[in-house]
């Protein structure tokens, strides 16, 4: 099954191809598993840092953590790096930006100071480039966080022992959306004031606590003198600090729980062992390459495709421009449009109106359902084993169908943002928003039943608790 | 609860160690004192958290004083693209049949919630055939379009709420839940449009 080529090992992956395990490796002939000798940590003379901090202990504890190599495993890293790029470019913007809505005279025009300062940013080529990178990176962060969570969902990796990290992930997705919403207010153009004004009204529609919450969050009745300093502090400090903390916890839990692995790892290493490249140096190299690639891509994109230039909407005026939110909030907008005007509920603690239902309650329900996934999934009962491998989606038809339903439903909400423009009535829209996701989910269910493996060849995604020593190997 | 005659090894809870000699040590009193101290610590944490939360409440609003519409305010063009310059007084003749126009009270144009939509409906109704409503949508607070839509209704660019100007701005479509509150109109000595009172009802979303 395997040949030994000098120090390297070629291992049959079972699918006709071979994988190459690059570290000096020996294969145990009976179990056919690669055995990796401990790296000798006997430097001739201890280094300067080694003498003072004992870094080799740190290295052998964390540096040898094995990272499975798989394209979708880079989505989470992309989200982290997007955040890093946002912080770096955001600091540059913060050096020039002024969070004030006071109107000043600029060459004969009355402009809010924030707007004027962003116009100044636009007039400095390098600052303008950073502004564009900041905005594009925000899109990239939302997109990669979302795709990352979909990968976890469809392969069933939110189950034991990773329920907590799933919750932190849902928190990170929410914080990312929140940061983007807050960022939108800052340029203070007509678009910003409209979008933020709607956010303010939605916050006010919270029963009982609405006014206090809205005023705390928006620094008074938006738009007012207190609004921009408040939103700015939340945007550049509070939310990023919370995001950084959550990312830290998220990564620590990955070290603790270890990665789930692609199915082929089960054939290459004994069940429960993580097969992948060690954190240092291989994974670090890959990660730095990814970061460089993202930096490069974002700069090229920003140079070629300017995003949200100020002149597009101009300074805020008495008229409301014809705007829809960006794609990642468009589904909330769809909800707002789909709730009919009569949907009002009087409760002892206040009125629940269509704004609250569409703007907060229903979006909140979707996030709530997502957060509860590990507890709604009947395969994840406390007594079961640990899920350590990606489970092929067609092996879990119900999860696949539910996931497809939710995705299609959110897709229909995007469509709902335009329903009246394509000539549909509200009733038709409601009907379609249930029927189309239902049909797609049924199709997914049937496909999985048809294409799914029969009982003997079901892939077992579980394993005993992983031992602490892992099997790092270049792959 | 504390057991009087055995003690558990904290490192290995399955092993019961022999009870220590308690002498005249009063277990009952010891545990209430411990409970009391635990509560004091918890209350201390709570007070600490409150000490940070309460000032935030005090920082709720940094409000600039803004004036609403009052009786006698002269109504002026809100923007320049309606045939006249923004800020000049509006005469009833500026508004043809079946159209709308947005105005501000003179001198109070920095308060967006003073924006008013004036519409010409059937002659003989309103003041000289004109009616006026707050232009702030009661759904989520966008400014409605100045121009009426094809059905002659006031429409909102944000989520397409529609209001019927000939019918007390009743909601005739979209998610808004309340009619736009009306502004009573009057005519000034020079024949220009004035407000004959404040806007009658809460402006924008409730
Ligand atoms: C947590 C991740 C973050 C996201 C998702 C995000 C997103 C955004 C968005 C969408 C905008 C509007 C951009 C535009 O209109 O061009 C914005 C503006 C801004 N952001 Fe961020 N941001 C993040 C973190 C940061 C950080 C950490 C800082 C500073 C340390 C920062 C500083 C700024 C500044 C100063 C502006 C206003 C300038 C402008 O609009 O051009 N941001 N942000
Ligand atoms: S704000 Fe006018 S319809 Fe939503």
Image (tube, coloured by chain):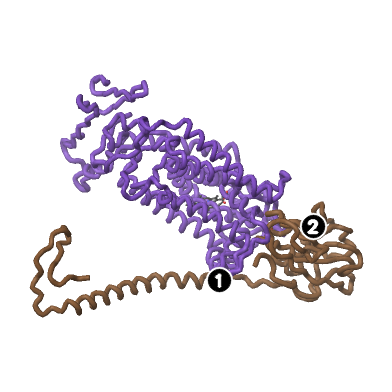
Chain colours: A purple, B brown
Residue at figure coordinates x 78%, y 70% from the top left: B183
Q: Secondary structure at mark 1?
A: loop
Q: Secondary structure at mark 2?
A: loop
Question: Does A239 sit above or below residue A208?
Answer: above
The answer to whether A64 appears left or right of A412 in the picture is: left
Q: Position of residue B186 (x, y in %)?
A: 85, 72
Question: In this rendering, does residue A81 appear at all?
Answer: no
The numbered dot on residue A429 is none
Disc 2 residue lies near ligand 2 with CB under 8 A: no
Q: Position of residue B196 (x, y in %)?
A: 81, 75
Residue at the farthest front position: A455
Q: Which residue is mark 2?
A: B153
Q: Position of residue A25 (x, y in %)?
A: 23, 27
Q: CA distance from mark 1 to mark 2?
A: 35 Å
In which quadrant of the rendered view does residue A203 lie?
A: bottom right
Q: Which residue is mark 1?
A: A349
The quarter of the picture where the C terminus of chain A appears is top left
The answer to whether A171 appears left or right of A317 in the picture is: left
Residue at figure coordinates x 87%, y 72% from the top left: B187
Chain of the residue under label 2: B
Residue at figure coordinates x 26%, y 23% from the top left: A8
The answer to whether B53 appears left or right of A128 in the picture is: left
- Mark 2 crowdedness (10 Å alpha carbons): few <14, some 14-19, many ≥20: many
- In this view of the protein, which residue sits in the foreground, A211 or A271? A271
The answer to whether A53 appears left or right of A216 in the picture is: left
- In this view of the protein, which residue sits in the foreground, A33 or A38? A33
Question: Does A2 sit above or below residue A456?
Answer: above
Residue at figure coordinates x 39%, y 70% from the top left: B49
Front disc: 1 or 2:
1
């Amino acid at each position: 099954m395997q040949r030994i080529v000098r120090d390297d090992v070629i291992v049959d992956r079972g699918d006709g191809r071979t994988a190459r395990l690059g570290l000096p490796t020996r294969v145990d002939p009976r179990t056919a598993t690669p055995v990796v000798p401990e790296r000798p940590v006997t430097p001739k003379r201890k280094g300067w840092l080694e003498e003072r901090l004992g870094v080799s202990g740190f290295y052998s504890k964390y540096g040898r953590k094995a990272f499975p190599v798989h394209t979708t495993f880079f989505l989470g890293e992309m989200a982290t790096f997007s955040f890093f790029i946002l912080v770096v470019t955001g600091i540059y913007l913060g050096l020039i930006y002024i969070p004030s809505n006071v109107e000043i005279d600029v060459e004969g025009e009355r402009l809010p100071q924030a707007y004027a300062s962003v116009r100044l940013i636009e007039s400095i080529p390098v600052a303008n480039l950073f502004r564009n990178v900041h905005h594009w990176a925000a899109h990239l962060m939302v997109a990669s966080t979302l795709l990352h969570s979909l990968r976890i969902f469809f392969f069933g990796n939110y189950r034991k022992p990773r329920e907590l990290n799933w919750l932190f992930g849902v928190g990170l997705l929410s914080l990312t959306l929140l940061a983007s919403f807050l960022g939108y207010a800052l340029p203070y153009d007509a678009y910003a004031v409209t979008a933020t004004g709607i956010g303010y009204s939605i916050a006010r529609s919270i029963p009982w606590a609405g006014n206090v919450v809205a005023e705390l969050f928006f620094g008074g009745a938006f738009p007012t003198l207190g609004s921009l300093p408040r939103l700015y502090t939340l945007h550049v400090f509070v939310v990023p600090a919370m995001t950084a903390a959550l990312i830290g916890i998220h990564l620590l839990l990955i070290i603790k729980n270890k990665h789930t692995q692609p199915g082929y790892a089960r054939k290459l290493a004994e069940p429960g062992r993580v097969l992948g490249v060690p954190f240092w140096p291989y994974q670090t190299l890959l990660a730095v390459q990814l970061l460089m690639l993202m930096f490069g891509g974002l700069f090229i994109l920003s140079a070629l495709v300017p995003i949200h230039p100020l002149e597009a909407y101009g300074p805020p005026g008495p008229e409301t421009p014809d705007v829809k939110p960006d794609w990642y909030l468009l589904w909330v907008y769809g909800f707002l449009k789909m709730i009919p005007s009569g949907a009002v509920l009087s409760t002892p603690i206040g009125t629940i109106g269509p704004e609250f239902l569409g703007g907060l309650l229903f979006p909140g329900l979707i996030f709530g359902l997502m957060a509860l996934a590990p507890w709604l999934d009947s395969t994840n009962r406390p007594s079961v084993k640990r899920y350590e491998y990606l489970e092929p989606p067609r092996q879990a038809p119900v999860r696949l169908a539910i996931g497809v339903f939710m995705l299609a439903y959110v897709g229909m909400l995007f469509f709902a943002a335009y329903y009246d423009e394509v000539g549909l009535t509200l009733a038709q829209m409601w009907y379609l928003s249930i029927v189309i996701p239902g049909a797609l989910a049924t199709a997914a269910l049937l496909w999985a039943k048809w294409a799914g493996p029969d009982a003997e060849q079901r892939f077992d995604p579980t394993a005993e608790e992983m031992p602490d020593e892992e099997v790092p190997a270049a792959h | 609860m504390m057991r009087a005659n055995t003690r558990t090894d904290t490192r290995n809870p399955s092993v019961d160690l022999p009870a220590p000699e308690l002498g005249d040590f009063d277990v009952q009193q010891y545990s209430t004192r411990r409970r009391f101290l635990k509560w004091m610590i918890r209350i201390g944490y709570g007070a600490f958290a409150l000490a940070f939360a309460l000032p935030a409440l005090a920082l709720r609003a940094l409000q600039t004083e803004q004036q609403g519409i009052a009786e006698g305010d002269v109504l002026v063009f809100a923007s320049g693209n309606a045939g006249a310059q923004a800020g000049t007084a509006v005469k009833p003749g500026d508004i043809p049949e079946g159209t709308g126009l947005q105005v501000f009270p003179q001198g109070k144009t920095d308060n967006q919630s003073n924006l008013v939509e004036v519409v010409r409906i059937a002659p003989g109704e309103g003041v000289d055939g004109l009616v006026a409503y707050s232009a702030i949508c009661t759904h989520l607070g966008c400014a409605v379009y100045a121009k009426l839509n094809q059905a002659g209704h006031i429409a909102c660019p944000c989520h397409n709420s529609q209001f019927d100007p000939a019918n007390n701005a009743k909601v005739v479509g979209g998610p808004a839940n309340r009619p736009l509150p009306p502004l009573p109109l009057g005519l000034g000595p020079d024949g220009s449009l004035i407000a004959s009172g404040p806007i009658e009802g809460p402006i924008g979303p409730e």
